[in-house]
Image (spheres, rainbow, N blue to C red):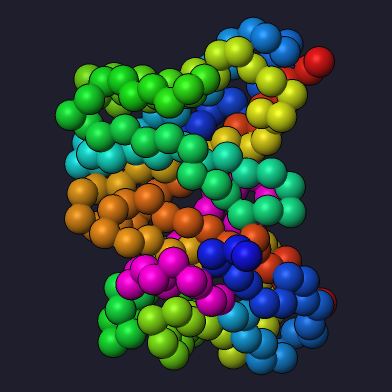
Amino acid sequence: DQQVKQNSPSLSVQEGRISILNCDYTNSMFDYFLWYKKYPAEGPTFLISISSIKDKNEDGRFTVFLNKSAKHLSLHIVPSQPGDSAVYFCAATQGGSEKLVFGKGTKLTVNP
Amino acid sequence: DADVTQTPRNRITKTGKRIMLECSQTKGHDRMYWYRQDPGLGLRLIYYSFDVKDINKGEISDGYSVSRQAQAKFSLSLESAIPNQTALYFCATSGALETQYFGPGTRLLVL
């Protein structure tokens, strides 16, 4: 049973526009969520995170929104740049367990 | 220099062979992890270690073993490699917080 779901395998946007990547989870015990970005031939790189006590966290062009009642989070990238083209993984954990559960990833392509 | 290094970066082996993948970190973290990634799938946890004397099985530990030789080193072994262990393997570390930092990965092909 997949506890963290990224239902869109791929997303294509124009440079300068907003990219919205979505993630759903089923385990209500998850209380910390992370986004990782992965380029080909490299390991995943931490991007941004959010605790369940918040509903929004912002870091430069990246904003993560959390809707606990819907068990849904999203990553917004504004404005999108070609260098943002990568696979984005959503991950979740239950506080103290330190085991991350990953989604399957969404491949973002930002076209110039 | 990279904080988390993995060797080798690429490996081709034959069914039945024993191989070891190595991970070293300079971040001073106590916690280390091994994941595998298959095409179209997310990362799945194989083993994790909270310190040198603490080793725990993850989601898919069958067919694998690990050794935590020191705080900075965590090795993954495939005792008798099989073709469905062909995958991309990542090592990761974390400190007191949940954020994990990943190595560059080892691409393994089992023929």
x and y percentages locating residue A75 in the rendered image: 47, 23
x and y percentages locating residue B56 in the rendered image: 33, 76
Q: Is residue A36 magenta?
A: no
Give the tally of numbered discs: 0
Q: Is residue B33 magenta?
A: yes
x and y percentages locating residue A111 in the rendered image: 78, 17
Give the residue displayed 21% in from the left and 49% down from the top.
A95
Region of the chain picked out in magenta, as a range: B23-47
Give the residue displayed 50% in from the left and 72% down from the top.
B25
Give the residue displayed 61% in from the left and 54% down from the top.
A43
Q: Quadrant of residue B100?
A: bottom left
Q: Is residue B93 left or right of residue B38?
A: left
Q: Can you say whether A16 is above or below B109 in the image? A: above
Q: Can you say whether B78 is above or below A60 in the image? A: below
- Whether residue B46 can be seen here: no
Q: Nearer the viewer, residue B110 or A32?
A: A32
x and y percentages locating residue A82 in the rendered image: 74, 24
Q: Nearer the viewer, residue A85 or A92?
A: A85
